[in-house]
């Protein structure tokens, strides 16, 4: 049911062709979402401005292509995450303009330049080289959502001077995403240097008692720095998305 | 060492009273923080605009009063969290203008009106009545940090219509803090309704397999809604602080 | 020992060819189940009306076929779960009337129409597309046990309006099985909408801190909605079976 | 907004005193729950027929009394769970007809005889003497919700003959709630004896590696008997509620 | 150092060619195990009467053969556990008299009949068909250690009558090994039926919240039956070994 | 129903006053346990020879006294475990011959000398002084069950020579119970020294990552010595009981 | 058996009053520890140079005094840890020279100046004020073991400049003990600054997902800095002891 | 910025070509590490004397070769850990002098003899044969860092005499690394024998409740021997590194 349908009911009421009881009944069951309520408008605005996201894991190449066809026909920028490198070539055959990001497995398809909707810079900071795939997922996500994104890699806390060398860059960012595995200490240190929000992403990097990222996750949740919040293990997309919401011009 | 000291070195070099080697030696060991570098300035600005925070747990009444005396002498707004209700009267005797918030155990001391530094409203949403102490800690924190704060209580997902009734309030907020225990589902539902950042706070509310908030924590980390990040269990202060950073006028 | 054997003892006692002591000894050791006691009758009735279930995991194709031959010779409807897609063709060669359900890996073999033994409709609700295999296992189980089954897919809590659009369908069901991974919040929301029992099935969908379904499991156990009970992770069969028992005409 | 308000809008439309745009705007924001939609009706019916439930833990005696006053004024049967034995006398002073159940800490207040709304008997089975408080909470819940409830206590699996002696009672029940701590094996054995749904309630009974009920919880989730579903640790209320929904006459 | 060496010292002391101090020094550092002390004798007796055990996992076929050659040259009965089925043929080529037990992956090599060293029968009871590999490992271990072993399979607690049918066999055993996965309830029931020791073996059978055998392990540790002790998950060898020690004629 | 009742049925059949169908019906429902079948005999023998055990935790002094009165009237030796030291004096007033064991909280009441039913000695070995309460519970249990019990205390693995000094005592025992907290290493070392069964009891001794006995429990389950099985944390009673079953003359 | 006994045997052998077989038998069973072998000597040296340690938790004041009397009579320096502040006055009455350290609950009793046995300085670094009790336990332990100890408090990673200001002190230490709760990140940062061994001590400081020190423990075990090893949660004594062994002059 | 750059600034100040303000600005942002400050010197000294370490897991053969080329051009000794045996041949083609250690997967490349920088011997002790890869990683690490390393293998606590035979070797070592899986008891026993520091390495050896090394890890953290600290599961490199720091001549 849409606005047209609703007007029809109102018209019926006005003209007397519809009783109050009939109108009430019709209104009771109307799926309010289809009325163009804020919820839906809002969702539309999300869909317009922000990319549709396809979680690639467990979907076949055919399924992914089909969803992308549907989206691209609506001129939506497309972001697909966790796309196996074996699936990428076939997808790119159908969408020659699609771009595959091999480190993160993200795949993007955009038409024209992405409009900058952010207040400032989103900075992605990562601790070790094996955290880069997750960092890249955050970067790709934040970029397609219309942000200026920079990154600083390989500044783990074991060599704190490497991080200190990047202090200026870190302090000029509007939102900072910090990606780290192992003990997950980096967000605490970064959080202590800045007055802007820090999104911490634990990664499954490490072995033994890192327990697939639990050590880093707990470390970040218990950060002694205020102004740090946490997303799921390896969830670069979630961090990039959250950072974009924070950075977005109101 | 401060700017004055540094200038003295430079002067010495200029005048020749200090050799290059002596100057190098002095500069190598200079504690850069004491120079008034950005780091420190920045910290100062934080301390001015944002309240000093005293984590009250495990501190004696005397210790708390001593820290508060030091702070209030510097005209800092003071926020003390987790203050036992037994300690509050004695503190209030020393600081008659201090305000104790019994639900959360927070205690605040401010002079004059707090300047509004936020872009919009911070909304605190909580699921059940037992989540209110944590919600209140977030409110007190966000208010003393210069934000307009509103709240919506008792809108757990078991009665989804209660939440739906507050849709407008939720959508008008600039940042939303969602406090929930038990299964921690509320941030996912709220996150699906809005396009603004959601800070999720798991609480230790519940029994049995809630494991002191672990169930809620995991639920929130695994939220199927993008745009949700998480702070530690019962960490209302952390959520209020994070929300303030996000809401802050640049 | 069966009824015939028991009568023989009684006859022996009556005729005096068996002493009390001999009879007592014989009766003491009689395996009561073989007498056709309620327990067994009951089991038989289960076996007649309800399908034999073969848990396919870890069984060879030959073993599965052998059990199916035994069962189908007794006119039992057969349900085999977790059948590898590689094993299905060979089984279907032996049982051309068998039906393989590829999403869940369930395989059914029935003769004639299944009699409807249910009071109402069993509705299977699932949150995300990756929950569908588990949902399908529940559907197949409930159908072969003689129920009218409907389903509503892809109504996760991140887009609560999709669920709201299905409110009528949900409220008309007699039993509802809710399948969800990640934070497992859906059963709480559904449980808040209905006055009928909800069986919650956590799935191993998700990554990172979903811990193979633990997050969803804990979420469901801590549901703030009354009228929700939980089965094991990914246990679509168990949920379908439980729903069938609840729905069964007395 | 209620039906009266809605009719006013329709009237305004009919009379021309309200434009389509105005009507649309009003309807968009109408809180659908207040219209007496099924959701609410349904909730009302729940509230009428089924008791209001007050979770007593963490509420003051005054708060509990206030809620009870509100409810009893509406002639609702009242169920309050987890009421400290120290609070009971004061509550009983205000409500002399209230009944306190000391084993479970439940407190009930009903007027007149509770109408039987169940199809059959709900049987509460418990393993050990220390499981009785949880069992009693289930009993009280199921009784106030209009069921005939029986119970069988102290039939743990370590003395399987005690359980076997109660086979008839168990098989005649329409729904069975099984309460057990330690290894939580009882629901599996009971589930194997009957063809009716079994609700398993793990209790925190035990020590050492029982981990406050986790051992029992896991045991029940992994039950090798089909037709068993599980509620939270010590959640006798949840089990009684679920059993009532299952047993309810349609 | 062996007895010969020791006698040499004693001789030297007696003859005076060795001073007390020299003798003391020599004796202080003597590795007592090489003297044929009880410890070692005892170990030898174990090795003679009880099989050498080779844990096959992670050893190459060549390593296994080499150890077996060493052992069989000493007329030791050989037990090798967890031998991959791919390695078995090659081993059997070298030791044509070796016997491979495919279900458990155990491999045995004995010469002549194994002497019966047990007081009574060891009974291996298992719950489901997927527990059989572990049960078989226990059987093979107990048999090569000189015991009369019987077994009862597929008597899980979901069909308690199957177990009851085997009561006599169970009660006549001197030691009982109970192997079960999922909820691990069987040892509690068996333990309640007998007055002989029960060794419980949790298996990794199950899925979801069975957590690779943790559910069964916890269930068994919390058994409400006295007279039950537990070995590691899937440790059929350990259970068979323990049962042999218990059953051994003194 | 007892033997007398059964004979009545047989008589009725013989005399013709009871039809086959009536007899069958009566026999079907006979609670076999009440016939004095092996199960019950066995239980009786347990009850005669082995003590009734009262788990004192959570029982009132009155309840404990009542159960003890019932038992002692039947001349059963009584073992009550985990009796609070505050309850002991009152119990001893009623039963002046009862003996309270303050370290473990066990309380025993026996009449006459306990007959020795064991094959050999049960040795209780404990690691640290804080493990003694659990060790004592094992001793008291094994003694009242008719065993000769010895003990060796304070022989933790950090001073391995202390253990070595007790080698002879350890090797002469028929069954060994090893009680240890912290890392739980002692059973592995003891198990390597003997050819008799070792029952390992983890204790909740320790702090930090001992997690209330989990570290010790895991250590014992993973013992590299064969011939070790494990009971629940702090379960001295269970270990003493298991050891008694093993040691019992057949 | 001591050296005297051994000489008697050797004498017997020499004189012929003891046969070789008799001597062998005697020697086989000699408890080597009592001979004053290296093991024992070594232990003695530990006892002389290093303090006896009394773990005070769970010991009565009387027990503690008794052990201290025994020790002090042998001129041993005494270290007692985890002494309740209520017990301290009574102990000090008996040993007026004993010193109680209230923050850590350690109590020491020494006679004369402690000889410095260390190569360099041991530095104790702690993150937050609530880590100080654990840090102090490490200090007291290291001091009584004969080390020069310094400390740096309140240099958590959230304000990295505070740590940087202490770089020189940190780099001049020979061994560094780092005490931290919450996310436990400090040892990684310190480990990256120095080339000397770092002993990390997680503390139970924190709340929510710090899980009583698990978060810090995991963080430290997963430290990205090499040269960091970890002791148990809150184990200041263990860290001080380990640091002393490392620092000890060879 | 390096010393040369810094001198240029000083020169500018002296000559007047640079104002104080300009100099201050330049100095404020100078990356202090590039000045050759202690931190960096220290790092350099580490890099010179101690090997660069490449963590091979997840790096391609090409990446590893590239890093090695860079390092070897600077005459650094190279240590690469966790190198897949498939990658080794290709690397050795480029670096014919590289040595591959197949058990641990370590690969080393050194020029000339490694200078001995240690005070004494580092002894690597391992419990079972499956712990050898981790032990070897520790050996290779300690050797390339300039230590004399010895090892004792296969001395698990189940045969304590094997360990006792090596007592002298153990006591003569300056630092001891103890590698053990399963229950991880060996470090406690070794720690009780010596007065030198023990580094404990838990391994993922074992099955079932060993939980990939958690059991061993917890066992070691709870060691009842003082003077034991722990590194991450399977972290042979970390243990070898820590041992080297301890053993290093000051």
Image (cartoon, coloured by chain):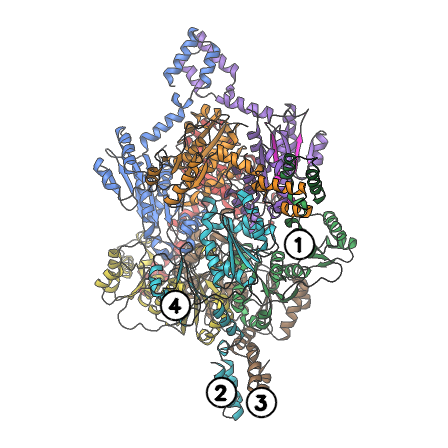
Chain colours: A red, B blue, C brown, D yellow, E green, F cyan, G orange, H purple
Please tell me whether mark 1 sits on a helix, a strand or a loop: helix
Q: Are marks 3 and 2 on the same chain?
A: no
Which-is-in-front pick, marks 3 and 2?
Answer: 2
Q: Residues within 10 Å of mark 4 (few under 14, many from 20)?
A: some
Q: Are marks 2 and 4 on the same chain?
A: yes
Residue highlighted by disc 1 = E46
Q: Residues within 10 Å of mark 2 (few under 14, many from 20)?
A: few
Label 2 and label 1: CA atoms lie apart by: 58 Å
Residue highlighted by disc 2 = F8
User: Do the residues under discs 3 and 2 have CB atoms within 8 angstroms?
Assistant: no
Res C176 quadrant in image:
bottom left
The magenta stretch is H101-130
From the top left corner, tell me how far across and down residue G54 is, in percent: 43, 40
Residue highlighted by disc 3 = C11
Q: Are marks 2 and 1 on the same chain?
A: no
Is residue A183 visible in the rendered image? The answer is no
Residue highlighted by disc 4 = F67
Identify the residue at horizontal 65%, vertical 27% (top origin).
H69
Chain containing mark 1: E
Q: Residues within 10 Å of mark 1 (few under 14, many from 20)?
A: some
Which-is-in-front pick, marks 3 and 1?
Answer: 1
Label 4 and label 3: CA atoms lie apart by: 46 Å
Q: Which mark is residue H74?
A: none
Closer to the chain start, of discs 2 and 4, is 2
Is residue H139 toward the left or the right of residue G59 in the image? Answer: right
User: Do the residues under discs 2 and 4 have CB atoms within 8 angstroms?
Assistant: no
Membership of H35 in magenta stretch: no
Please tell me whether mark 3 sits on a helix, a strand or a loop: helix
Q: Is residue H70 above or below residue A74?
A: above
Observer-nearest of G12 and A62: G12
Label 2 and label 4: CA atoms lie apart by: 34 Å
From the top left corner, tell me how far across and down residue F178 is, in percent: 53, 53
């Amino acid at each position: 049911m849409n606005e047209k349908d609703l007007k029809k009911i109102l018209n019926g009421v006005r003209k007397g062709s519809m009783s109050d009881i009939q109108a009430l009944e019709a209104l009771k069951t109307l799926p309010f979402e289809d009325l163009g309520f804020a919820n839906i408008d809002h969702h539309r605005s999300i869909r317009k401005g922000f990319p549709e996201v396809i979680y690639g894991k467990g979907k076949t190449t055919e399924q992914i292509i089909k969803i992308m066809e549907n989206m691209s026909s609506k001129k939506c920028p497309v972001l697909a995450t966790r796309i196996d490198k074996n699936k990428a070539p076939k997808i790119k055959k159908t969408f020659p303009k699609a771009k595959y990001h091999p480190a993160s497995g993200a795949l993007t398809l955009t038409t024209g330049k992405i409009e900058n909707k952010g207040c400032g810079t989103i900075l992605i900071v990562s601790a070790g080289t094996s955290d880069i795939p997750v960092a890249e997922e955050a970067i790709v996500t934040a970029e397609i959502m219309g942000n200026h994104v920079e990154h600083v890699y390989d500044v783990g806390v074991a060599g704190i001077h490497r991080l200190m060398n990047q202090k200026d860059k870190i302090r000029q960012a509007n939102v900072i995403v910090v990606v780290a595995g192992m003990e997950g200490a980096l967000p605490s240190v970064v959080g202590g240097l800045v007055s802007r929000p820090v999104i911490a992403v634990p990664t499954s990097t490490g072995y033994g008692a890192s327990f697939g990222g639990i050590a880093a996750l707990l470390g970040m949740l218990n950060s002694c720095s205020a102004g740090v919040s946490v997303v799921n293990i390896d969830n670069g997309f979630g961090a990039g998305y959250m950072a974009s919401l924070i950075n977005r011009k109101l």
